[in-house]
Amino acid sequence: MQRIHIASDHAGFVLKQELVRHLADRGCEVTDDGVFTEESCDYPVLAHKLCRAVAREGCPGILLCGSGIGMSMAANRHSGIRAALCTTELHAKLARQHNNANVLCLGARITGLELAVSILATFLENNFEVEGVRHARRVSLITPDAENQ
């Protein structure tokens, strides 16, 4: 059973609830890291909470806000997190295969339910391409070591 963390701000709350149901139907073990109402909140708080869990547990995460941009920016501040804002299935496929993305970001005001479900399925069904070294080398360059900063 695949474990997945999911979180949203108030703008992504309704879509998050739908995706939680979809994930449960797929047999995933879903941890909902909030929010639990449509009351206005600060998206970075939720992004940081989810990213700490994803980094600790080594499982994928899903973040939703109105556009997906704010969540992706906050998530990518975390070492070891490679958050990808995806608006198509191809984005999701390539984010996993080429960039080893471990957090999917979606914009609830941008992406409808049917497309969001399809993007999510694509994200979960694909893995990092480990054949050869080009993708692994490039991913390793995303977070430079301290001496190269």
Image (tube, grey):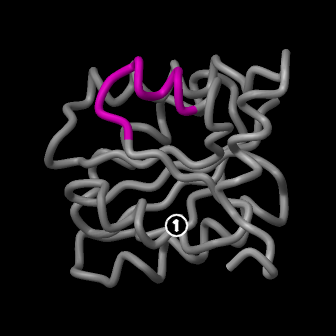
Q: Main secondary structure of the magenta part?
A: helix
Instruction: Identify the image quadrant of the N terminus.
Output: top right
**Callout 1, which amino acid?**
Ala
| Residue 13 in sight from this viewpoint | no
Q: Which of 89 and 100 lies nearest the eye of the viewer? A: 100
| Residue 142 in sight from this viewpoint | yes
Q: Is residue 94 magenta?
A: yes
Give the quadrant of residue 42: bottom left
Q: Which of 117 and 76 lies nearest the eye of the viewer? A: 76
Local packing at callout 1 (Cα closer than 10 Å; few below 14, some 14-19, many 20+) is many
Q: Looking at the image, which residue is at 39% across and 64% down?
A: 71
Q: Is residue 56 above or below residue 134?
A: below
Residue 8 drawn at (x, y percent): 39, 62
Residue 76 drawn at (x, y percent): 53, 65
Give the quadrant of residue 117: top left
Residue 132 drawn at (x, y percent): 84, 18
Residue named by callout 1: 75
Q: Which residues are magenta?
A: 86-95
Instruction: Identify the image quadrant of the C terminus.
Output: bottom right
Q: Which of 35 and 115 lies nearest the eye of the viewer? A: 115
Q: Which of 11 and 92 lies nearest the eye of the viewer? A: 92
- Residue at the front extreme? 148
Q: Looking at the image, which residue is at 77% across and 63% down?
A: 55
Q: Is residue 2 above or below residue 144?
A: above
Residue 115 drawn at (x, y percent): 28, 23
- Residue at the left extreme? 109
Q: Looking at the image, which residue is at 22% across and 62% down?
A: 11
